[in-house]
Amino acid sequence: MNFARSAGILLHPTSLPGPDGIGDLGPEAYRWVNFLAESGCSLWQILPLGPTGYGDSPYQCFSAFAGNPYLISPALLLEDGLLTAADLEDRPTFPADRVDYGPVIQWKLTLLDRAYRRFKRSSSSRRREAFEQFQSENATWLPDFATFMAIKESQGGVSWENWPRPLRRREPGALQTFAAEFADTIQNHIFRQFLFFRQWQALRQYAHSRGIQIIGDVPIFVAYDSADAWSHPELFYLDDESRPTVVAGVPPDYFSETGQLWGNPLYRWDDHQQSGFAWWIERIRATLRTVDIIRLDHFRGFAAYWEVPYGHPTAEHGKWSPGPGAAFFEALRNALGNLPIIAEDLGEITPDVIALRDQFDLPGMKILQFAFAADPDDLFLPHNYVRNCVAYTGTHDNDTSLGWYLSAPEKERDLARRYLARSGEDISWDLIRAVWSSVAVFALAPLQDFLKLGSEARMNYPGRAGGNWAWRFEAHALDDALKARIKETNFLYGRLPESMKPPKIVKKWT
């Protein structure tokens, strides 16, 4: 894929401001898109948009296809007549700087239930037709997802491995009986998806109108407690009781001394290949209807993945098993054409991973925070970048740049100051300038770095079960001074969109 030199900001919608305890797809999201466009950015990178479950992680979703209903904007539902002002009068008081997920989820589901009841009572024929069309267009995954969520709700929220065996094993008679008894609950979950995608697609279209492309995120693995594993158990290593036999993770690395035990079920890649990778093709096709560019998480897992026997407490003891390799990407390319994919090629990278990435001309990732632990030959230093890469100060899995600098060994901080030729007093922007000035086709940084925030604003601690994904910024943070500074940086390093570039001055020799 031939990307154009540009820049952007990493920010998940949950981090947006707003009165309902969590960022959403409403007015503040549109204000954010305007800020990006006016600062000369062309890219907005987000995390996975799926419905979050245990731990509130966007990388452990109930579906690889569905959207997160907690991102639905009550303000837009009010505009649509699906909520009234009275429906919002009992809004709790939420913290402005973080997401308190328990109360937020309770509040959002209360509002969504009110909207559903009003939809059933008084929606127009036009809206009902749109609802029916949405169901028809998403028939490959939506009924299974809605049924999965309805069963989970009826079972008190427990993982599907603990459901009654007939429902766990998807026996037709049991599913038919359940669907008849809980038809309204199933429809409610379908309605939430209708609202999410209606709001998201409107926001995405607005972003396009402002010249913004959205970089989405596709985790290589799905959650075990998901509609995907429940509805397609034949695609995963599950035993006769529907429990995993092996699970995903990564061995010990610079993130964790004991590795990361993700716990996701692993794919039966031979079965996927026999189907022509049909499930994966549908997954990527659905994602590309939602975002413009995909960051393919844990790219190295397509060459080889770390397999941990189910039940082990850490990821230390496992083995490398072969992934689907080039056959997978050939199938995607044959079905979908050019692949607008960024390969997340971090971690333990071996020559076969590099060869697979380069065979399909996929840009890899460079993280500047990783660059100062060794010497000038480090491939994460900007002078060693190639054009076909995407450079970051850090990602959602790293500390903020200020937090990294304050906690890094003095040897790393010394090399950073010497390399950047700066004192370190404005280290966040020092790293931003280094990334922006590089040859990397895309330059990105989390909003936290533009705001010069410390570890208190970190989004995720890999390997930590709770307390992640909660950071939010307050509306006043996006001021004109910040906008001007970002725009100047984009101008200086040739990352402004064509529409914002000043006319070229042609010098004539006399």
Image (tube, grey):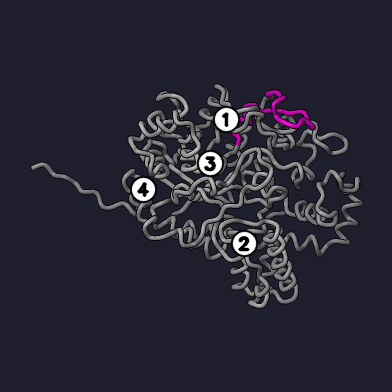
| Sequence-earlier tag: 2 or 4 | 2
| Sequence-earlier tag: 4 or 1 | 1
| Crowd band around label 3 with a 10 angstrom C-alpha radius: few (<14), some (14–19), many (20+) | many
> Is residue 268 positioned above or below 29 on the image?
above
The amino acid beneath tag 4 is Asn
Tell me where residue 400 appears, x and y as whole percent: 50, 43
Q: Nearer the viewer, residue 472 or 453?
A: 453
The CA span between labels 4 and 1 is 31 Å
CB-based contact (under 8 Å), mark 4 and mark 3: no
Residue at the disc numbered 4: 490
Q: Residue at x 68, y 38 (%)?
A: 221
| Crowd band around label 4 with a 10 angstrom C-alpha radius: few (<14), some (14–19), many (20+) | many
| Sequence-earlier tag: 3 or 2 | 2
| Range drawn in magenta | 298-320
Q: Nearer the viewer, residue 376 or 85?
A: 376
Q: Secondary structure at mark 4?
A: helix
Q: Secondary structure at mark 1?
A: loop
| Crowd band around label 2 with a 10 angstrom C-alpha radius: few (<14), some (14–19), many (20+) | many
Q: Secondary structure at mark 2?
A: loop
| Front position among marks 2 and 4 | 2
